[in-house]
Image (tube, helix red, strand yellow):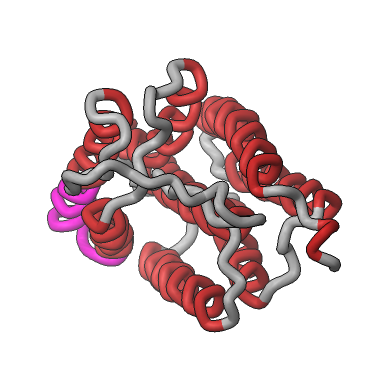
Amino acid sequence: MSPAAILPASASLDLLERWSRVHAFAMLAATGIALVAREAWPIALVGLSSVAALVITGARSGARVGTAANGVTALRLLFVTSLGLAALAPPSGLLVALAVLGIFVLDGVDGALARRFGAESAFGARLDLETDALLVLVVDFLLHAVWGYGVWVLVSGLLRYVYTLTLAVFPPPGGPAPRSRFARSSFGLFVTSRIAALALPAAVAVPVAGLGSLLLWFSFARSFFYAYARPGVAPGEGAPIVDEALARDDAAPSDPRA
């Protein structure tokens, strides 16, 4: 595709933001249906369908869709969907833990491929972000519906979507806070806590899952604080944010995943 066919960065980011709001609302609605049905498949199928719609729309709009990195992310998305459908038959905790570990490892592979081949883009960043968010929600729902964790365990999986809609309804002065090193580390530790919760005996798993949730909640609280109380300052930093997302076509936006 010729460079002229690629959407300008501002139009590309606007498309992604509008889709994110619709997607967040759809995921919250799917979670409500899943709670009534006591099955994770509504979350998995709505998530897959919504992201597939983003891919189709992005391809038609000239976004950089067909890259190796996005291919790995798409594979991760299919694995996450399979986890949600696996709840139709009670899965083994250890097998699910191994599956989550494999998906988490692939999360590093797609990023490495994007950097290696210079394929970093707004579309790829959002696809990766939403796949991670879907993984968190599916795993947390399985812990609740299959392994009997309290409804508190779902909070972590819903925070991403609540964050997106909150920023849409009440736009912060400086836009969403960029993702910090603390947020990246928190997410890695959180996923580790979920793998442990699936693989370990309940006496150990529940406290570990609780600690992982508290860490992620605190990370999101930091993102809210820096978005509204300290606009234009990155979490953990003292210098103003310089938004370079519009400096080039199809540039990667700030990633507020906490």
Which residue sits at x=26%, y=39%? 233
- Within the image, what quadrant is residue 37 found in? top right
Residue 36, position as x, y percentages in the image: 54, 26
Q: Nearer the viewer, residue 155 or 184?
A: 184
Which residue sits at x=64%, y=62%? 78
- Within the image, what quadrant is residue 95 found in? bottom left
- Within the image, what quadrant is residue 50 found in? top right
Quarter of the picture containing the N terminus is bottom right
Q: Nearer the viewer, residue 236 or 83?
A: 236
Residue 89, position as x, y percentages in the image: 56, 55
Question: Does 87 sit left or right of 108 as displayed?
Answer: right
Question: Does 252 sit left or right of 146 as displayed?
Answer: right
Please say whether residue 30 is visible from this viewpoint: no
Which residue sits at x=22%, y=54%? 182
Which residue sits at x=25%, y=58%? 181
Magenta part of the chain? 198-213
Please say whether residue 20 is visible from this viewpoint: yes
Give the total number of marks visible in the rendering: 0
* Membership of 211 in magenta stretch: yes
The residue at the far top in this view is 170
* Membership of 206 in magenta stretch: yes
The residue at the far bottom in this view is 116
Q: Nearer the viewer, residue 75 or 22?
A: 22
Height in image: 28 above or below 211? Answer: above
Residue 120, position as x, y percentages in the image: 56, 67
Q: Nearer the viewer, residue 64 or 232?
A: 232
- The dominant secondary structure in magenta is helix
Height in image: 43 above or below 60? Answer: above
